Image: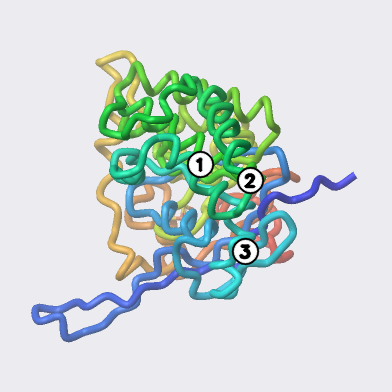
Amino acid sequence: MTNKLALSVQDLSVRFPVRTGAFGQTIKLLSAVDNVTFSLPSGESLGLVGESGCGKTTLAMAIAGLGPITQGHVEIGGESYSDAAARRNRALRRKVQVVFQDSASSLNPRMTIGEIVGEPLRVHRVGTRRERASRVETLLEQVGLRGDYGPHYPHELSGGQRQRVGLARALALDPGLIVADEPVSALDVSVKAQIINLLADLRARDKRSFLVISHDFSIIEYLCDQVAVMYLGKIVEKGPVKDVLLDPQHPYTRSLIAAVPSPRPDEAGTAASSFGELPSPLDPPSGCRFHPRCAVAVEKCSKLEPPLAKKSPKRVAACHLLGGAGMHGATLFD
Ligand code: SF4
């Protein structure tokens, strides 16, 4: 039996016009997300991993209806939300909610915690006032806050508590998909672990789908079934998170995993230092976009872009040195 899809993304691109040159006289198109295709079965979680500036947050915001789509389309829970009017539709808000990285700026400082968590219920006219108040208490308890936090304001809470409030608000409309954008990167180490455990508990309890954006493989490993690795606006590898971590196929994925800081100080940072700078997405390299940084590049890498190719039924990667058939049936190998 085929699993229902929580999310399907088809040939999605996001491009922004950017002024360049000494006087800003030239307009160039910045390709933040380039022809991205993937799907996520209901109840599963996908991690989007990559360096800052690789396009993962732009992709996530486009999926959540909070950012533009230049081309392609997004289906959430079986319904298409690609056209601008549909993406502003309230129905989309009931299907996908976002937990932001910076809880301090994503919560309205003039609203109480109770008002913040209850606002989606009020806007969508869910229940009576009394029922909404009771639901807010339940939501706060679900994220590990007592119901009596309701009358307090965001500035009275710690960073971890505010992130719990953001999560309670995201859960209010019971969405099938939650997009968590670097959900713990602004938190202290000790609080990080608590929020990661809370996300894992919520995932296991409700069988809800999560799209987790992070530059940290360990968070993706803990929270996700699948991982998609992004490089300069493109997915270069995708597969079950454990398989990708154990046996990364794409040279970029290997570099990312090797650059994860080691607990042993003598090993830390050696891979990262040989990794180099991310090229500008305004002027991406020809052929394989990773070729200027790739230690195993061959001649055709700078000329020909490798397609995402199936490595096994569940894994795809885009590299000329890997075997298999392209996603659209083309054979990769010479
Ligand atoms: Fe490296 Fe070439 Fe593979 Fe790109 S296609 S990752 S440059 S070997």
* Residue to which mark 1 is pinned: 118
Camera-side residue of 325 and 308: 308
Residue in the image at 35% along x and 67% along y: 284
Could you tell which of marks 2 and 1 lies nearer the N-terminus?
1
Q: Position of residue 287 (x, y in %)?
A: 44, 67
Residue in the image at 52% along x and 54% along y: 235
Disc 2 residue crowd, few under 14, some 14–19, many 20+, Cα 10 Å:
some
Which dot, 3 or 2, sits closer to the camera?
A: 2
Q: In the displayed structure, does residue 65 sit left or right of residue 215?
A: right
Disc 1 residue crowd, few under 14, some 14–19, many 20+, Cα 10 Å:
many
Amino acid identity at mark 1: Gly
Disc 3 residue crowd, few under 14, some 14–19, many 20+, Cα 10 Å:
many
3D distance between C-alphas at marks 3 and 2: 16 Å
Q: Secondary structure at mark 2?
A: loop
Q: Secondary structure at mark 1?
A: helix
The image's mark for residue 175 is: 2
Which dot, 2 or 1, sits closer to the camera?
A: 1
* Residue to which mark 3 is pinned: 74
Q: Secondary structure at mark 3?
A: strand
Could you tell which of marks 3 and 2 lies nearer the N-terminus?
3
Q: Quadrant of residue 183?
A: top left
Residue in the image at 40% along x and 64% along y: 32
3D distance between C-alphas at marks 2 and 1: 15 Å
Q: Position of residue 173 (x, y in %)?
A: 61, 45
Q: In the displayed structure, does residue 68 sit left or right of residue 122?
A: left
Does residue 274 appear in this view? yes
3D distance between C-alphas at marks 3 and 1: 28 Å
